[in-house]
Amino acid sequence: MKSIWVVDDDHSIRFVLEKALSREGLPVRTFSNARDLLAALEEDSPQVLVSDIRMPGGSGLDLLAKVKARLPHLPVIIMTAYSDLDSAVAAFQGGAFEYLPKPFDLPRAVELIRRAQEESQREAVADEAAAQVPEMLGQAPAMQDVFRAIGRLSQSHVTVLITGESGSGKELVARALHKHSPRAEGPFVAINTAAIPKDLLESELFGHERGAFTGAQATRRGRFEQADGGTLFLDEIGDMPLELQTRLLRVLSDGQFYRVGGHSPLRANVRVIAATHQNLESRVRQGAFREDLFHRLNVIRLRLPPLRERREDIGVLARFFLQRSATELGVETKRLSEAALAQLLAFDFPGNVRQLENICHWLSVMAPSQVVEAKDLPQELLQAGTSTELTLERSEDAPATSGEVSAAAAPQSGAHAPSAVPLPGAGVASEAWVMEMAREARRLLAAGEPEVWELLSRRFEASLITAALELTHGRRIEAAQKLGIGRNTITRKIQELNLDV
């Protein structure tokens, strides 16, 4: 096991932490200055670093920057006797795991270091998994079926039709089919037939001769020619105009086509992979899609499952997207708390994997701390979760559906769900915190937790005071005024609740 490293010029702090951590069975290594610690990094690395913020020969913030440059995922706890806002902000902006003001309660400090150690272990597992990230992620049985199909088709030139909802990753599957085919050395050319105006799509697909229409000042090769020797991916094929469907059918039948305005037939050695989110059989019945083209494309069909059918993949996909977003943005990778991950797992993701990717990118920019809590998630997830909870609370006898929380989360038979406290302008979204507290109260009571009233009251008060202080940038008098309490009251509560503000 790697050691916990403590660096502080105060001998008594080093001594107290070393003894406390040793009693917990945690190996410890101490340093009196940043220079010695940086020299030790040349040969070894810690599991957690606990550093003072002001030391002779170099500040803890400078040390934090240097350590993070070498070990970006190392949890670093910054200690200081100078509890000012600027230091706290600078520590977190530098990637600190937590900020520990002196004098600190020793059991609390040990608990914090334990949390950092657990985070370090999770990061190590995540880094190992990330190092082995394949081109497509998925442990769900439905995705394993897709992977097996790609493997079986790896040596084939057959036309493939990929079906699946928007955002489910159809182009990724098409790219994988190309990459693992005998055409891998050839080009992969993709075109979204729904994104190109009808009067331009023919030219995009087949090219045009000079002077074929107004603005055609030079001969242009179409996508079929560009994909010669490789793969042409036709996305959203169900939206292709009927007249172009006829031309596409002719190409698939005999391999020949004409440029717009051309008179000489051209040939292209192209494998076609098509994709659609629509039901093509239904489109055929409606007369919007040619039946003969449908059968020509539907040689091998791959159905890509929506994300709600592969919920076990949400966690690994989210970690991957958070890592990728952090790399693109040049920031520290955000981590999901268990509550935040549970909220993601309960969401149906109508936008599928693309929506999850966008949410992770949003979190990389907007989440206020390195560990993403449930409250930090976008409103689209929070409101969806609240709506589900309210359905359960108000309709206990209704059968559970796939989008609802399990029945175990509802009150036991004969029990009555607590009514939400009426609030000015309260609606589904504003009742969310009430429902969350009610659910937490039921959990604690069922577990036999002592002093539930005191525990939840302290959490509630701490949340109110912390929110008000964040809003007022730490100005206690202004925060007290907003909360409707006195200046002495907020000072006393901060002390009683041991708030780090």
Image: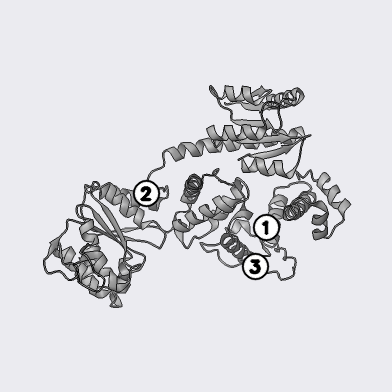
| Lateral position of residue 329 relative to residue 396, left or right | left
Q: Amino acid at mark 1?
A: Glu
Question: Which residue of the protein is positioned furthest toward the left in this rendering?
Answer: 264
Label 3 sits on residue = 428
Residue found 28% across the figure and 70% down from its top: 200
| Lateral position of residue 138 relative to residue 240, left or right | right
Label 1 sits on residue = 436
| Lateral position of residue 343 relative to residue 252, left or right | right
x, y percentage for residue 378?
58, 58
Return the mark for residue 159: none
Quarter of image, res 255: bottom left
Q: Amino acid at mark 3?
A: Val
Question: Which residue of the protein is positioned furthest toward the front in this rendering?
Answer: 217
Q: Quadrant of the N terminus?
A: top right
Return the mark for residue 144: 2
| SS at mark 2 in the image | helix
x, y percentage for residue 183?
22, 49
